Image (spheres, rainbow, N blue to C red):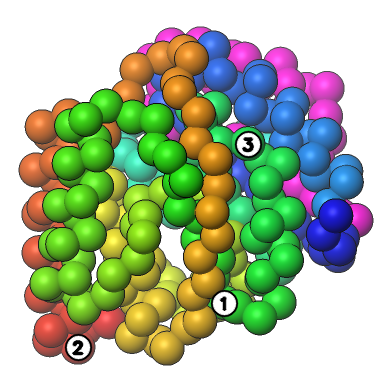
Amino acid sequence: MAKKLPELSIFFPFWNEEENVSRVVFSALDVAKKVTVKWEIIIIDDGSSDNTLREAEKIAFENKNIRIVSHKPNRGYGAALKEGFQNASYNYIVFTDGDGQFDIAQITKFIDKIDNADIVIGYRRKRRDTFARHILMYMLRVWDLIFFGFWFRDIDCGFKMFKKESLDKIMPLRSEGAMITTEILAKAKRKNLKIEQVEVDHYKRQFGEQSGANLAVIVRAVLESMILWWDIRNKRI
């Protein structure tokens, strides 16, 4: 069992995850009590059009350690992560995606490494996604190697932990869409931050629909990536 952290902010980005939000948040409630002394859980509702926000409000009403940040309209994955980072109160920050495909109990693997790192990022032992998403993941790794000069086993894995002081060094973040993870790692590389990787399990989505292979999401990611590359090349960040 990993040591207990003195304090921890946990947040989840949700978009149209009404069938997942309760299961994901209640799992985090159980885990938080075991791994940290002082904690908070932040539910980020990224402009959901279903009952995600209503379900979140029910949970938060009964738990003083839970807060909700909600915005409309839907802005994108990057925007949701930025809300989480900006609203986190404590010195250790972790997020997982709100689709229920990760086990928050595996945070102990991240805690074991965070004292000797600035950022700890997960990589999926076996990715439980469609073939198209596997192809996109490989293309992203190649893309980031060419344009940003780094190679990680699983760049867009939605399970990451940060020290707040390290996160502050790469803020502000610009990307509103899926390229947020590339921006985080590219800026961390420029700041010579130490990044550790840990293996995590990945589970099949039980409820809801994925959006990562959506054409609009891909086009937006490419555009944001080129803006990031230009900013780095011209030393704007």
Q: Amino acid at mark 1?
A: Asp
Residue drawn at point x = 80 percent, y = 44 percent: 32
Instruction: Choose top left, top right, bottom left or bottom right for residue 31.
Output: top right
Residue 110, position in %: x, y?
Answer: 65, 60
> Which mark sits nearer the N-terminus, 3 or 2?
3
Instruction: Choose top left, top right, bottom left or bottom right for residue 54.
Output: top right
Residue 47, position in %: x, y?
Answer: 40, 27
Q: Secondary structure at mark 1?
A: loop
Residue 44, position in %: x, y?
Answer: 53, 37
**Nearer-the-camera pick, 20 or 60:** 20
- Say which residue label 2 marks: 235
- Say which residue label 3 marks: 103
Q: Is residue 49 left or right of residue 96?
A: left
Q: Residues within 10 Å of mark 2 (few under 14, many from 20)?
A: few
Q: Is residue 222 left or right of residue 94?
A: left
**Nearer-the-camera pick, 14 or 196:** 196
Q: Amino acid at mark 3?
A: Asp
Q: Distance between the Cα atoms at labels 1 and 3? A: 22 Å
Q: Which span is picked out in magenta?
A: 36-65
